[in-house]
Image: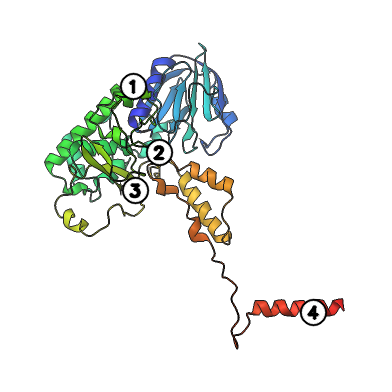
Amino acid sequence: MPELPEVEAARKAVEDNCIGKKITKCIVADDSKVIDGVSHSDFEASVVGKTIVAARRKGKNMWLQLDSPPFPSFQFGMAGAIYIKGVAVTKYKRSAVNDEDEWPSKYSKFFIQLDDGLELSFTDKRRFARVRLLKDPTLVPPISELGPDALFEPMTLDVFTERLHKKKTEIKALLLDQSYISGIGNWVADEVLYQARIHPRQIASSLSAENCSTLHKSIKEVIQFAVEVDADCSRFPLEWLFHSRWGKKPGKISVEVGADSSQYPTNWIFHSREKKPGKAFVDGKKIDFITAGGRTTAYVPELQKLSGTQVLKETGKPRGKTSKKTSVDDDNNDDIENPTKNEDENLGSLKSKKETGKAGAKGKKPSKRKKTEESDNDNDNDDGDAGADNDDSDQVEKKKPGKQTKGEKQPKKSVQGSQNSRSTRSKAK
C-alpha cells in the first residue's frame, strides 16, 4: 500500500478538483529524508504562482504538471497519501490521517492552497515517501527506470508471454519487479495469482501458454475493476482474496484499508495469519501465508499448486523459508514491501545503523524510545520480519562468578585488581 489503484485514485481526485487552478500558497516540510534534493524554501518559491495543468502517474509515482517546470513529483512509498480538504479521496492502511485530525496534518510534507481556496496535502507518516521537484520526472529515476504501466501501457498477450518465458525467476517476484511491469504491489500480485490459479513461487519461464493467458487477463481485470471503484475495497467483489488477507482478529471486521466497517456484510469474518495460522479461508478454502518475492504472500494451496519440475525441487524444503532478497518493488504496498532499489532506501539505512550499533554497543540494548520508533516502521507490515530487531542475539552473556579450583590460575584482571588493592592499602598506612 499504496499500489497502482490507490495512486490512480489520488491522481483522478487531483485531476477532477485542481486542474486549471493557480497555486497561491505552498508549505513544504523541512524534512530532507522525504523532500529529496531541494530545500523546502526553494521548493515553495518554485511552485507558488503557477497553474496546475495536469496530474500524471506512472506505476506508483505521481506528479503535478504545472504551466512551466519544475514539477512536484511524489513517490508514495509505504504510507504516502494525497488529501484534498472537503473532497473524499480513497484512504488506505497506513495513510494515518483521519477527517477529524488537524489540517494540514502534522504528517504533511507538501501543502498547497489554490486560488479558489481549495487545499491539497501530501502526507507521509512513515517517511519512506520521496517528494521531488523535477524538470521532467519521466527522464530521471525512479520513473525513467519503470517498466510499462499496468493500466496505461498494458502489454499485449504475445509480448507478455514472450517476456515471461525469458524469466527464470519466481512469478510473484517478477510481478513485484517495477522494471518489468509498474504499479503492481503485494496485494495486487496476490490477487491476480489467486484469480489465475498460479502458485506464487512458480518459475515464470515454466508457465504454460494457458497460464500466461489467464494471468494476463487477471492483471487487466483486477486493476481495471479496482481503478473503476477508486480503490474502495468495500466495493471489491466478495470472492476476491483481498478481503481475507488483512484481518487482525477472527470474527471482527477489518478496516485497515480505511473503509467504513458498516459497508461490509455482517457475516464477513477476517482471520489473522499471525495469530491464527492455517485458519484463514476464502470461499471455504484454506489460505496459507509464505514468503515469496521477499514478501509475505497469501495464496490458496488447494487451487494454486506448483507444477512441473518445481514439485520435485520443493519436496523436503521447509515452506516459507526463502532468503530475504530485496525485490524491485517499492511496499506498500502495502507491506514492507522488502523495499526496492528505486523506493524506500530508508530501510537500508535503518539496517546499517542497526549493524553499526551492534558493533559498538557492547551488548547494550537500544533505549526503549529508540526501539519503539524503529518498530513503528514495521509492526503492522505484512512482512514483519523485514525490520525485526535481533536484540537477543546481541547480548553478551555474563558469566556467573564461580569458585576457583585449587591450582587454577587467577585471571590477570583479578590479579591486577588484587595488586591495586594492596597498593592502595599500603599508601593509606
Q: Can you identify the residue that label 2 sits on?
A: 142
First in sequence: mark 2 vs mark 4: 2
Q: Can you identify the residue that label 3 sits on?
A: 294
Residue at screen point 39% across, 35% down: 139
Instruction: Answer with left or right where residue 236 lies relative to residue 140.
Output: left
User: The residue tagged with tag 4: helix, strand or loop?
Assistant: helix
Q: Position of residue 205 (x, y in %)?
A: 19, 48
First in sequence: mark 1 vs mark 3: 1
Residue 148 in view: no
Question: How far apart, in angstroms, are the residues tagged by discs 1 and 3?
Answer: 33 Å
Q: Can you identify the residue that label 4 sits on?
A: 423
Whether 254 is drawn above or below 351: the answer is above
Indicate the amino acid at tag 1.
Answer: Gln
Q: Nearer the viewer, mark 2 or mark 4?
A: 4
Q: Position of residue 275 (x, y in %)?
A: 36, 44
Q: Position of residue 134 (x, y in %)?
A: 47, 31
Q: Nearer the viewer, mark 1 or mark 3?
A: 1
Q: Nearer the viewer, mark 2 or mark 3?
A: 3
Q: Nearer the viewer, mark 4 or mark 3?
A: 4
Which quadrant of the structure image shows residue 315?
Answer: bottom left
First in sequence: mark 4 vs mark 3: 3
Q: Nearer the viewer, mark 2 or mark 1?
A: 1
